[in-house]
Amino acid sequence: MKKAFMDVSKILQDNKFKIDEKNYRGYSVRHFCVDYRSEKLIKRIRGDYFTITFDYISLHQKSKMIKKELMKIFRVLFKEFKTTDPLIIGLGNSSILCDSLGVEVTNKVMATNHFTDFLNIPRVALFNPEVTEKTGISSFQLIEMVVKKLKPSMIIMVDSLATNKKEYLNNCIEVNNTGIIPGSAIKDNKKIDQNTFGIPVIAIGVPLVLEMDKDMYTTPNVGEVIHVTSDIISDALNDLFF
């Protein structure tokens, strides 16, 4: 479970780094490009980081607008990529509600990789590696095997995030092009980014767990948040590819 980027955004603002921000009624969109100056300060990989923050009411009432903003972000990140054969990976543990975002998203995205003869649309493949405790195999190893077999044009990874800021819990969708470490909670996996397999990697996440003093907390409505945000993410991906 990766740490949310929003946790370090205030550090960037305090140090006079520019963050592009657009504010709407009930939600806002931010973009920051981590460069050689800021990567050491916030300990993040160079690349583009986008966040869409929203309040609880807007998540429900303005989900279509949030989806449109998410699609704009995808178009910005995807414009230089070959999107003909994407592999969408749902990380996390489907048996633990707050860690099931990735699986919920892949359950709602249309798979077309098995249609090889007659469709002139992207061949989308979906994969849920689950967690090492269930499979006995690291998520990285499973993903590596699938990538070598399918040879996708790009990877999209979806995961639940942890945050140490209560104000970001359940109210943000984050997207970046810098990759992710599957199974980072057990510190036993390698990072997956563009250098790993030589193809672009997009990471998508929602802060669903509050981490404080080495303990983790969630909220009673986390299932509802996962349901709505997974709808937004999967609908945006489906509309983008199909």
Image (cartoon, helix red, strand yellow):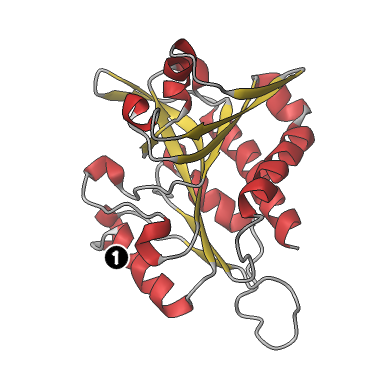
**Residue lying at the far top of the rendered structure:** 14
Residue 37 lies in what quarter of the image? top left
Tell me residue 192's x, y (percent). Answer: 37, 55
Residue at the spot x=71%, y=45% of the render? 71
The crowding category of the residue bearing disc 1, from other C-alpha atoms within 10 Å (few below 14, some 14 to 19, many at least 20), is few
Please tell me which residue is depicted at 39% across the width and 48% down the height of the picture.
93
Task: Looking at the picture, tell me which residue is in the foreground, 185 or 136.
Answer: 185
Residue 56 vertical position relative to residue 125 in the rendered view, above or below: above
Q: Where is residue 66 in the image (x, y as percent from the top left)?
A: 72, 34
Position of 167 relative to 227 (above/below): above
Q: Where is residue 136 in the image (x, y as percent from the top left)?
A: 23, 62
* x and y percentages locating residue 156 in the rendered image: 52, 55
* Residue annotated with mark 1: 141
Quarter placement of the C terminus: bottom right
**Residue at the bottom extreme, as displayed:** 117
Q: Check the image and report above or below for 40 versus 25.
A: below
At label 1, the amino acid type is Gln
Q: In this view, does 227 lie to the left or right of 27?
A: left
> Residue at image x 28%, y 40%?
185
- In screen coordinates, is 28 left or right of 95? right
Query: What element does badge 1 sit on?
Result: helix
* Front-lying residue, 136 or 142: 142
For the N terminus, the image quarter is: top left
Q: Residue at x 76, y 40 (%)?
A: 68
Exactly how many numbered labels are in the figure? Answer: 1
